[in-house]
Image (cartoon, rainbow, N blue to C red):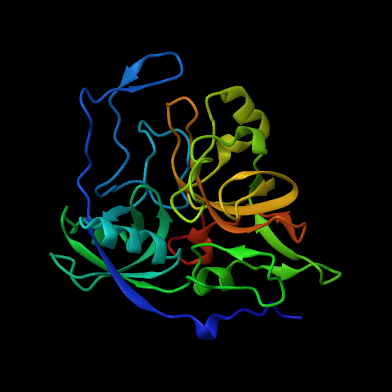
Amino acid sequence: MQLRTNESRLVATAVMGAISQPSLRYPGYTLDAQGMGAVLPGMSGVVYNARVGDPAFGWAGDHVEPGVSIANSDPAADMALHYLTCMGNRAIVTSGMAKGAEGIVTGEHARLLVDFAPDVNEMLCVGDTIQIIALGRGLMLEDFPQIEVKKMSPKLFNSMGITLSEDGKKIRVPVTMELPPRIMGSGAELNSEFVDQDLMSGDRDLMAQLGIDQMKLGDIVVIPDADHRYGRGYRKGAASIALCIHGDSVMTGHGPGIMTLLTSAESVIEWVIDPNANIANYLNIREQA
């Protein structure tokens, strides 16, 4: 039995943003868990040497956003950019030296994250405008109404190798790893339709013990017993499938960012460990990650 969706009834529309300049608040320092300050790059602008498929840990940076970060200066238009854009959507450069080049949406943080080929990145400038063909809002699994789909394009959904369980009563999703609910930190207070939730990665020994320090940008992961329908909370038997969208942080309560893709309060989501469960592979963004 094939998973049935309402893909044919979704509405495609255009939203636009511009490449953001990185910014710092005075005095620019970020404090780590020991109270030591550092000035580190990572958010906004054009990142040349970090893409989905690269490690989420180990960068000399903070909340590193792979690829290009875009926003809209109009607050209402920026909300539409966030709420309507879905992972895997096409992105088209509409101004500047790279005008006409196409990329793909890979994450949502304080801004939308878009991957372009390295030769395109070299031509992009802060302020260049990028239009996204937004498609995916309203996506549903017709035989599993208890599962909510969040910010996932049909292209990504169809590429993830999601199947039915043997008894046909659950879906089975390939993931690279499980994340215990107890390590989930900043972002629990936010609407799960908007932005991500960070891991609490300050305990490096625990990260190594759980294998989480091997996480890659773009990895598909699962948080067991996590209900992300309307916020992000603990519920026994629930499960949430998520996407690693940004890198580690030195800040207490912060770490790699995890953006919700699928969630259910009922026990209808299974998972299988697959080290290749990364959107770089699913969306043919680069050589196998």
- Where residue 79 appears, as percent x and y from the top left, is 33, 58
Q: Which residue is drawn at 40% across and 66% down?
A: 84
> Is 127 on the left or on the right of 245, as rendered?
left
Q: Quadrant of the N terminus?
A: bottom right
Q: How many marks?
A: 0
Q: Can residue 119 be seen in this view?
A: no
Q: Looking at the image, which residue sits at the far left?
A: 96
Q: In this view, does 118 lie to the left or right of 160?
A: left
Query: Vertical placement of 120 versus 211: above or below?
Result: below
In the depicted structure, whether residue 98 falls above or below residue 266: below
Q: x, y percentage for residue 118?
A: 29, 57
User: In terms of image quadrants, where is residue 78?
Assistant: bottom left
Residue farthest along the right direction in this orientation: 167
User: What residue is rendered at 64% in x and 73% in y?
Assistant: 141
Answer left or right for 80 relative to 243. left
- Where in the figure is residue 174, as x and y percent of width and height? 67, 59
* 220 vs 184, nearest the viewer: 184
Q: In this view, does 2 lie above or below 37?
A: below
The answer to which of 254 and 211 lies nearer the viewer is: 254
Between 70 and 177, the one nearer to me in the picture: 70
Residue at the spot 48% in from the left edge and 34% down from the top edge:
255
Left or right: 168 as drawn, with respect to 129: right
Where residue 267 appears, x then y in whole percent?
77, 57
